Amino acid sequence: MKQFFAYCSPAVYAARATYRAFHRQLRLILLLSALYSLSQAIALALLYLLIRQLTGETSEPLFDPGPSLSMLQSVPVLTCLSALLLVAGIQIRQAIHRVTISASQASGQRAAELGLLRARELSQAQREPPLSRKQVKSMVLFVTRDVPFACGFAARSATTLAFNLILVALLGAVMAYISAVLTAVLLLVGALLTLYLSRSFSKAVRSSDERSANIANYRAEVDALASRISADTDDEQATNDSLRTLLATSNARQQLVSRLQERNERQTGGLLVEYAYPIAIIAIAIIYSQLDSFAPDITALALYFLLTRQVIISLYSCGNVFMSLSKHHGTLTGFRDFMRDGRLPPKHAARGE
C-alpha cells in the first residue's frame, strides 16, 4: 500500500492544486453519479420483479412493494419502467462525460496559470547564477505544453474514480443485502487483487522513471548517431555494423523496451479485476452445495450476477485509471517538484542548459 500511495501522490498533488478550478464540476459529477447509481439499482430491482412475474416464481420476494404499489408488479409496467430507467442512466452517463471534459479543461488551464506564476517568481528571484533566457523558455514550455494535459488527466481521473466508486458503493450495498456471505468473499478477493495490482503500478512507474533518467544519455547518443550517418566514409559495411551495434546496446533500445514494458503494464494491470467474476462463480457453487442456508433464491441470484458484472466493470475502470496515471507520472512528478522547489524534469532541464 505504501507503493500505491507513493504512486498516486503526484496526481493527488495536481488535483489538489487545481481543485478550485473544477470543484463545481466535481460536485455536479458526484450528484449525477448518485442519480445514475440509484437509477441502475432501481432498474435492476424492477427487472428482478419482472423475472419473477415471467417465471411464475412463488417464493418470498427480495422486497415487498406494498399494496399501494402492487400495480408495479404487472409485466407491462415493470418492462416500461425498467427500460425508462436504463435509458435515463445512459443520458446521465453522457452528461457526466461532458462535465468531466469541462473539469479536465479547467484543471489544465489552472495548472498552466500556476506554472507560469511560479516561472515568473523563479526568473525574478535573486539567485546566482541568474536564470538564462533558455532556462526560462524551458520552464514556460513545460508548464504550457506538458503540464496542462497531465493535470487535466489527473482531474479527469478524480472525477472518473468518484463516479465509479459511488456506483460500486451503492450497488455493493444491494449485493450485500442479497447475499452477505458472497459479497464478503468478493470484497476479500478485491482486496487481494488491489495489493497485487500495486506491483503493476511499481513496474510501470519504474519504467517511466528509468526512461526519464536516461534522457540526457539518449540525446547524446542521438547526436552520435547523427554524426555517424552524416560522416563521409569509404567503408559502408563497417559504418552499418557500427550503427547496428550502437542501436543494439544504446539508450535508444532501452527507451523502446521501457515504453513497451510500461504500455504492457498499463494494459494488463486493470485486467486483474476480471478474475473476480470466475471466483464469484466458484463461490456461488460452494455456497449452494455446502451452505444452502446462506444461498439466495435463483431469481435473486440472477440479479446478483447482473450487479456483480456492473461492479466489476466499474472496478475495471478504476484499475485502468490508476494504470493510465503511469503515462503522466513523470510530468505530474515534475509539476510537483517545479512548484515546490523549482526543479524541472530531466528532459526539460537538459533543454535549458
Image (tube, rainbow, N blue to C red):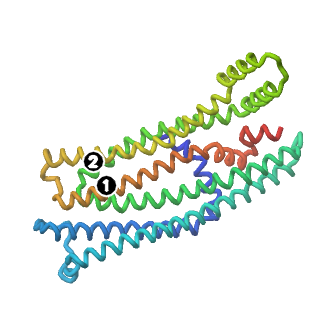
Nearer to the camera, 303 or 345: 303
Task: Give left or right: position of 30 versus 80.
Answer: right
Quick one: which residue is furthest to the bottom in this view?
A: 68
Marks 2/1 in contact by CB < 8 Å: the verdict is yes
Amino acid type, label 1: Thr
Per the image, the residue denoted by label 2 is: 280
Query: Relative to 6, does residue 98 appear above or below in the rendering?
Result: below
- Other residues around mark 2 within 10 Å, as few (<14) / some (14–19) / many (≥20): some
- Going 55% across and 43% down the picture, which residue do you hit? 7
What element does badge 1 sit on?
Answer: helix
Task: Give left or right: position of 255 versus 118.
Answer: left
Q: Residue 85: horizontal and vertical position, in percent?
A: 35, 73
- Going 68% across and 22% down the picture, which residue do you hit? 244
Nearer to the camera, 161 or 82: 82
Nearer to the camera, 86 or 96: 86
Q: Residue 188: horizontal and vertical position, in percent?
A: 32, 45
The quarter of the picture where residue 113 lies is bottom right
Q: Residue 333: horizontal and vertical position, in percent?
A: 65, 44
Q: Residue 156: horizontal and vertical position, in percent?
A: 56, 58
What element does badge 2 sit on?
Answer: helix
- Going 26% across and 58% down the picture, which residue do you hit? 304
Amino acid type, label 2: Ala
- Other residues around mark 1 within 10 Å, as few (<14) / some (14–19) / many (≥20): many
Task: For marks 2 and 1, give the CA distance.
Answer: 8 Å
The quarter of the picture where residue 249 lies is top right
Per the image, the residue denoted by label 1 is: 308
Nearer to the camera, 316 or 186: 316
Please tell me which of labels 2 and 1 falls first in the chain: 2
Task: Give left or right: position of 238 versus 279.
Answer: right
